[in-house]
Amino acid sequence: MVEAAEVVIDVEGLVKTFDGRRVVNNLSMQVRKGQIYGFLGPNGSGKTTTIRMLCGLLVPDAGRGTCLGHDILTEARQIRRRVGYMTQKFSLYQDLTIRENLEFVGRLYRLDHPRDRASAAIERLGLNGRDGQLAGQLSGGWKQRLALGACILPEPDLLLLDEPTAGVDPQARRDFWTEIHALAAEGLTVLVSTHYMDEAERCHEIAYIAYGELLVKGTVDEVVAGAGLTTLTVTGPGVVGLPRDLKGLPGVDMVAPFGLNLHVCGRDRAALEAAVAPFRGRADLTWSEGAATLEDVFIDLMSRSRDNFK
């Protein structure tokens, strides 16, 4: 049991409905201080709605909880003062420079010495030499760094990142995550939503939400082990037509291409082996057993989830 003093986010039974559709359904979760908590799920699954309820921008229809020790139902203003929230869309001023944007944020929060604070953020995030560049002229990766700098400028206790690396190149994503881990090591708590499996694996714990339902949570190893998937890897020239032959067979819960290979997964090992037995003798296929990946687990979870738009 985690001691209450270590818990930054502690919510139970959160519900949010829009136009008669339950976007978040009975969601409960805990996030500890200094933790990087990954929030994963398909588009429209309720991740952004949950983040907005946690930081006091939306009021849940049902449920209870605290964020940074404050009640999410009655103390939203106190929560917002201590949270940095980075949205999917770049929200700073395109016609101001990097420095001007950061100094503006410093003055908005009434920080002491906003120029010095902006200079420290520029130095920390490697924006030196670009501080006079207009934000609107920056690439996606540099905009991301600027947005992160604006979020951490007021020294929040909790950072909420809503798909912060969508549309940026792999090097920029790696640099971003290096900084996130450095911030967490200093005691900052981070909740981040992402679609990228490599980013999920960088988190201390993850939760997977699909169409309003929180399906699994834990460390990456716990989530993969808990799925109970047996994964067979198939290679060879015959893999092209194999998904069509295997899909729908009893015991085959997922068939997905991975480069030149095919992953065939099932939760019942015996049933899976029986399903693929007729194909093992084919000379154009080579079969081997591999370890289930996080992506295998999430594809399987998505295939079993019901879209609440339908």
Image: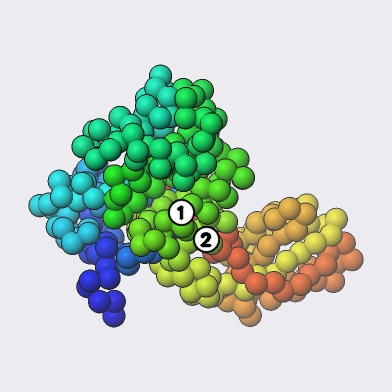
In the picture, measured across the screen, residue 6 lies left or right of residue 207, that is left
In the picture, the disc for residue 213 is none
Residue 266: % across, % down: 60, 70
Circles 1, 2 touching at the beta carbon (< 8 Å): yes
Total numbered labels placed on residues in the image: 2
Along the polypeptide, which appears first: circle 1 or circle 2? 1
Sort mark 2 into few (<14), some (14-19) or many (20+) by Cα contacts within 10 Å.
some
Pointer 2: what residue?
A: 202
Q: Quadrant of residue 97?
A: top left
The one of 230 and 27 positioned closer to us in this rendering: 27
Q: Secondary structure at mark 2?
A: loop
* The N terminus: image quadrant: bottom left
Query: What's the residue at 22%, 43% (across, down)?
Result: 57
Q: Residue at x 35, y 59 (%)?
A: 189
* Residue name at image x 62 percent, y 73 percent: 230
In the image, what residue occupies the spot 69% across and 72% down? 290
Q: Secondary structure at mark 1?
A: helix
- Local crowd size for mark 1, using a 10 Å CA cut-off: few (<14), some (14–19), many (≥20): many
In the image: residue 199, left or right of residue 96: right
Looking at the image, can residue 13 be seen?
no
Q: Position of residue 202 (x, y in %)?
A: 52, 60
Amino acid type, label 2 = Arg
Q: What kind of colouring is applied to the model shown?
A: rainbow
Which residue in the structure is indicated by mark 1? 180
